[in-house]
Amino acid sequence: MIGKLFAWLGVVALFGTALAAQQDIVVQYPVGTTLAHGTAVDLGDHPDKAPYNLTIRIVNIGTGTNLVLDTSASNRPCDGAAAIRCNWFITQPASTTLAPAASTDFTMDITPNDDGKWSVWLAVYSDDPDTPIYSIMFRGTAGKEEEEDDCSTNEGSGLSFLLLLGAVSALAVGVRMRSARV
């Protein structure tokens, strides 16, 4: 009887914890399209390296508590990181406390600064127990990417195949001759 009671209490504690730690935050880009944490968004090619002006929305999808965006540092609640071949600037959201079902928008300007592939990570910091840092990668291309020097001329690929075929044939003949002797 006591064993069943402890088992029941364990189940209640497990589900109670799971319910208490619900995800409250989602990030949308474009506004209305929810992006999963860790998603990469390809913004395509801008051959003229024109800037992107993105309007991004943060939504509290929780039902019971306010979502508080973390403003503990000057670069929060929204920050860019690991930028490759681009510059970025974020205009922080006006609201930092979101009631259930509430949202706030902010802008992120991304300007490619070199030809080729570019990327930057967006991080949104909050008090969400499951996802305190919600990350999204934005990427694209700009201009014409330079060809890489790999010192390969692709010559000899036919010769390599013939050498491989010859080695396999020699091995097959050797196995057959050995089988004939036995």
Image (spheres, rainbow, N blue to C red):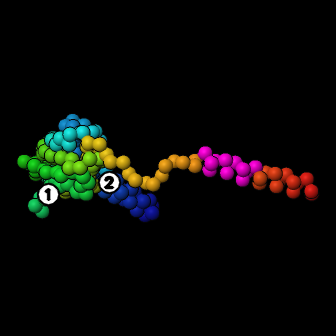
Count the numbered circles shown: 2
Check disc 2: other Cα within 10 Å, few if <14, some if 14-19, many if 20+.
Answer: few
Side of 30 where 169 appears, left or right: right
Q: Secondary structure at mark 2?
A: helix
Q: Is residue 148 visible?
A: yes
Closest to the observer: 134 or 164? Answer: 164
Most prominent secondary structure in the magenta stretch?
helix
Q: Whole-percent x and y of residue 69?
A: 15, 54
Q: Is residue 59 visible?
A: no
Side of 158 where 68 appears, left or right: left
Q: Secondary structure at mark 1?
A: loop
Query: Between disc 2 and disc 1, whose residue precedes?
Result: 2
> On screen, 16 above or below 32?
below
Side of 174 where 44 appears, left or right: left
Residue 167 is covered by the magenta coloring: yes
Residue type (three-letter) at the residue carrying disc 1: Arg
Q: Are marks 2 and 1 in contact (CB under 8 Å)?
A: no
Q: Whole-percent x and y of residue 92?
A: 10, 50
Residue shown at 22% from the left, 57% from the top: 81
Closest to the observer: 52 or 137? Answer: 52
Residue type (three-letter) at the residue carrying disc 2: Ala
Residue shown at 30% from the left, 47% from the top: 117
Which is more foreground, mark 2 or mark 1?
1
Residue 138 bears which disc, if any? Answer: none
- Magenta residues? 158-169
Residue 76 bears which disc, if any? Answer: 1
Q: Whole-percent x and y of residue 84?
A: 26, 54
Residue 18 bears which disc, if any? Answer: 2
